Amino acid sequence: MPAPPSSHNPPLGHGPPPPFPSSAISPLHLKFQSCQRYPFLNQIFDIELWLVNEAGKLQIRNEVPFTIKLGFEGEIDSTCDHLLEVVSGSRRIESNGKCHLTVRLLDVSASYGDAKFVFQATPLLDEHSYIGRGYSVPMSCVRHRLIVENRSQLPSLWYKDIGGKQNCIEILV
């Protein structure tokens, strides 16, 4: 016979989510709805955070304060908050289930061995302990971006032979 559901919730983000009885409200979590994959150094950009249920549906009428941290991809406990500046927006999911923040990153990924950055949003207060953390897509903060002109003249898929320097495609940037 399986053990009854535990009243103890493990720390969020570690192990499986706590069991919920079928009559309980669906477990909720924070979800980064929009986030750039290649933000530019010191340039302001917007991120949007939603409170959603297991099905990914937006949940309204729940105001949830949260903390936002910047870490490295694959290292949940890493923190590099000194590289994150929240320019505007409240760190609270409003009653419409959404939060808009304006942020900027203060160093490039290349300074950290090309490690990708990840935002982590964690609900505050014990009354919101049933709400799971949210993680953004991995981001590489860049200083410059190359734009290729006349892409229509290039093959859609091309492999470079690692050993041969003679294999190349000339492009205008």
Image (cartoon, rainbow, N blue to C red):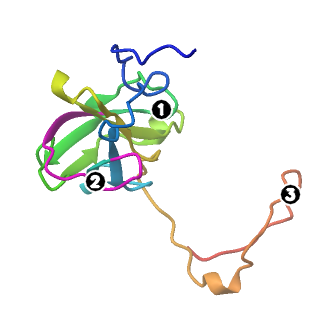
x, y percent for residue 105: 30, 44
Q: Neighbour class for label 2 at 10 Å: few (<14), some, many (≥20)? A: some
x, y percent for residue 113: 54, 33
x, y percent for residue 41: 34, 49
Any mark on residue 47, and which?
A: 2
Nearest-to-viewer mark from 2 and 3: 2
Q: Which residues are magenta?
A: 53-69
- The secondary structure type at the circle numbered 3 is loop
User: What residue did someone put label 1 on?
Assistant: 112
Nearest-to-viewer mark from 2 and 1: 2
* Residue type at numbered disc 3: Asp
Judge by depth and name the residue closer to the eye, 44 or 92. Answer: 92
Q: Are marks 2 and 3 in contact (CB under 8 Å)?
A: no
* Residue type at numbered disc 1: Tyr
CA distance separating discs 2 and 1:
23 Å
Judge by depth and name the residue closer to the eye, 29 or 72. Answer: 29
Q: Are marks 2 and 1 in contact (CB under 8 Å)?
A: no
* Residue type at numbered disc 2: Ile
Q: Identify the mark nearer the N-term, 2 or 1.
A: 2
Report the residue at 26% width, 29% height from top.
82
Report the residue at 33% width, 40% height from top.
29
Magenta-span inclusion, residue 67: yes
Magenta-span inclusion, residue 77: no
Judge by depth and name the residue closer to the eye, 5 or 151. Answer: 5
